[in-house]
Amino acid sequence: MTTQGPEPGRLAAGVNVITISRQYGAGGSELARLLAARFGFRVIDNELLVLAAERSGLDLAKIERVYQQRPTFQDLRVYKERSEKYLAAVHDVLETLAREGNVVVVGRGANLALLHHPNVFNLRVVADFAARLAHVQQREGLDESAARRTITEADYAREAYYRYLYNVMPDDPLAYDLILNTSRLPLAEASALVAAAFEAVRSARRPGVPNE
C-alpha cells in the first residue's frame, strides 16, 4: 500500500506506527498482517534490512550478520564499533518509516530505535513454550527436536542483540505500550485486543490532548 508521507524531517500526525517485538513462534508476523489489514497499514518485516542495504549501499549480508552475531562480553566494544555503520543504516530507514507513518514494523529492535517517537505504539508478543513449539512445527514442517533447537537459537540471538546493541533485555516491560500472550487467545481475537489498545493510545496521544 502506498501512502502520502509528511514533509521530510517531520513526524506524521497522530499515532500511526506499530512496532512488534516477538518471541519466535509467538505469532508476531501473523499478527502484524492482521493489524495491517485492519488499519490499512503496510507491513515491514524481513525486508527492513534489504531497504537499509539499498539506501546505504552497504552489503546486505554484513547488515544481516550484525543481528546474528553472539559476541562474548570481551568482544562487546569491538562488536559495537564494527556494527555502528550497519545499525545507522537500519535506523535511518526506521526514522523514515516513522515519519511516513501507516506502517507495522516487525522485529530488529524497532521498538527501541523508535522508543521516544510519540506516533509509535510498541507491542511485545509472547507465548508459552508449548504453544510456540506447536506453531513452529506446523509452520515450518519441523519435528519436535528441530523446532526446539530453532526456537532456542532464535531466542538467544534476539536476546544477544537487544543486550549488546541497546543494553536492555527484550522482555523489559518499560519498552512497550502493551505485552500480549498469544497462547491465551486465538490470533483473530488477539488482533482485536491490540487494535482496541492501539485506538486507546491513539486517542490519548492525539494532537492537542494534554498528558495527565
Image (cartoon, rainbow, N blue to C red):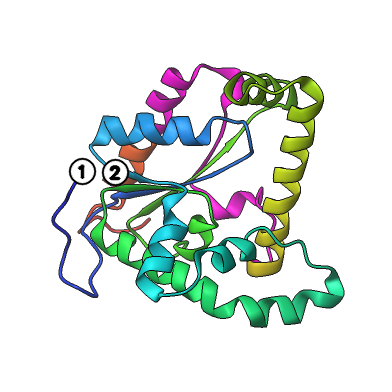
Residue sitting at 16 percent across and 64 percent down?
Answer: 6
Query: Camera-side residue: 121 or 67?
Result: 67
Q: Residue at x 62, y 22 (%)?
A: 135
Q: How many marks?
A: 2
- Pointers 2 and 1 in contact (C-beta within 8 Å): yes
Q: Which residues are magenta?
A: 166-194
Placement of 158 over or under 54, stated as above or below: above
**Residue under circle 2?**
42
- Residue drawn 35% across the image and 33% down it: 35
Q: Is residue 85 visible?
A: yes
Of 184 and 103, which appears nearest the observer? 103
Which SS class for mark 1?
A: loop
Label whose residue precedes the other's in the sequence (2 or 1): 1
Amino acid identity at mark 1: Met
The image quadrant of residue 140 is top right
Is 3 or 169 nearer to us in this picture?
3
Q: Is residue 40 magenta?
A: no
* Viewer-closest of 150 and 195: 150
In the depicted structure, whether residue 76 falls above or below residue 42: below
Element type where label 2 sits in the image? strand
User: Circle 1 sits on which residue?
Assistant: 1
Q: Residues within 10 Å of mark 1 (few under 14, many from 20)?
A: few
Lateral position of residue 84 relative to residue 188, left or right: right
Residue sitting at 27 percent across and 64 percent down?
99
Residue 198 drawn at (x, y percent) = 36, 39
Q: Amino acid at mark 2?
A: Arg
Q: CA distance from mark 2 to mark 1?
A: 6 Å
In the rendered image, residue 38, in percent from the top left (x then y), is placed at 28, 30
The quadrant of the rendering that contains the C terminus is bottom left
Crowd band around label 2 with a 10 angstrom C-alpha radius: few (<14), some (14–19), many (20+): many
